[in-house]
Image (spheres, rainbow, N blue to C red):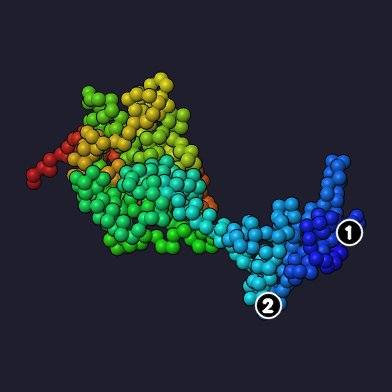
Amino acid sequence: MKSSKVKLTVPVVKAHACPAGTSQLILWDTEVRGLGIRALPDHIKDGVTVRGAKTYVFQGRVKGAGIERRITIGRVDAMPLEGDDTSKDEARHGARQRARKLRNMMDMGRDPQAEQEQARVSKVVDAERTKAEAVTLDDVRVHYIANKKTRNGPLKANTIRDINIHVDKSFAAWKDKPIKAITRAMCEARHAELARGGLNGDRPAPTSARGAFVILRALINWAMDKYRVGDEPLIRENPVRVLKGQMAPPRARSDMVPMERIGHVWEALRSIRSAPALPTAHTQADVLAFMLLTGARKEETLGLTWDRVDLRDDAGSWHLPDSKNGRPWTFPLSAPARALIAARPRRKGCEYVFQAAKGNSPIGVPRGAAMRAVIEAAGCAQTRHSLRATFTTLALNVLRIDLDTVELLTGHVPTTVVNRHYRETSDLRWAAPEVERIGAWIVTQANIAAGRNVVKLPRKKSA
């Protein structure tokens, strides 16, 4: 690299060129110390000679810091040597005006290059902030559903449904507003409103209010992790934290059917299934009966299709390819369960065992006459999950089936050493004898409840 000093003028700038064989040539101005014009050598591109670029540069040392900087001011063809000194618009300044400004900054101990980089970073951060602060609750909902992974894989359909319900209904007034704008005061007020009157304002719904804010808390936590401004989170504190200690405690999933009432429940469901009634009531009764016999979850039962059922007389089974915990399972079917499914009508074009009245879809969540019959026969409040809890309690406490087996039959991930290492934990047809005991016990209790197969004891003769 070569350089020399000369007073820069327009003709000098125009004539300046870098000779062949030199990487660059700089002419330094004798009028403004540190100002120079740098020329690069000509080069050949696509067989055509291209003139080397010429740019104004400034070189100086930051006072007190001992840092020497060489800064590119601008291209010669885009900037005059002399500009308008009086203009406040820097675009109208020439190379000498800019060089003088840089010299003054360095003499005051300021580093123009560092300040320029800081300005660039600030501009990027401002753009990030503007973009991040515009992210709405609905944007976060979409991103969360698309990207959130649990230990069992993507979110399940029911979880996505709950998220959508609460964002679209519980927080309908907030979903299109920036999520950063949700405040602690807003959370307190909305929670109180939902707990006091529910979505429609007509009845208390503290449990639903809790569910809504558990989901909102998860979405805001997601936003805190995923949306940042520079190195700072978009939201520093989750505003839902204000509700700590104020939300209704988690409700127990359900109460089980009392053991002495299981026969009455089965008999009540059998009566609905055999009585002349609407097909929908029959199907809902079948759903509840299947859940009681198998301990299956509601979603697993409603989604059961004919291609996943084996109804052999000796060892029937049903298959679950994608369970709540992400594992495939094959469960044995007891004789009563096989008989229940075998009696189910099949409709052309519908793949579901518990089909809706029309189309290729499963029936909805059991309610109405079938659910009322279960509650009345049980003698206490019940939900669909109660039947799963009843299955588990019956197997453990009445029939004394070992915990490891019951854990697997109810579709729980193996936790004990025995189940993890020494048992087949996906295909459970080896547990058919235990499932048969459960089915037989339920049917026997139903017979007793209905007065069938009761043997009268002979009277004791008087002495």
Give SS at disc 1.
loop
Residue that appears at 12% across and 43% down:
460
- Residue 63's disc is 2
The picture places residue 163, in percent across and down from the top left corner, at 38, 46
Left or right of residue 304, residue 51 in this image: right
Q: Relative to 280, is 296 above or below?
A: below
The picture places residue 72, in percent across and down from the top left corner, at 72, 61
Dot 2, crowdedness within 10 Å: few (<14), some or many (≥20)?
A: some
> Residue beneath label 1, please?
22
Residue that appears at 45% across and 45% down:
142
Amino acid type at circle 1 is: Thr
The picture places residue 300, in percent across and down from the top left corner, at 40, 39
Q: Nearer the viewer, residue 151 or 380?
A: 151
Q: CA distance from mark 1 to mark 2?
A: 32 Å
**Can you name the residue that lies furthest to the left here?**
462
Amino acid type at circle 2 is: Lys
**Can you name the residue that lies furthest to the top here?**
348
Q: Relative to 237, is 451 above or below?
A: above
- Residue 249's disc is none
Left or right of residue 317, residue 95 in this image: right
Q: Nearer the viewer, residue 68 or 95?
A: 95
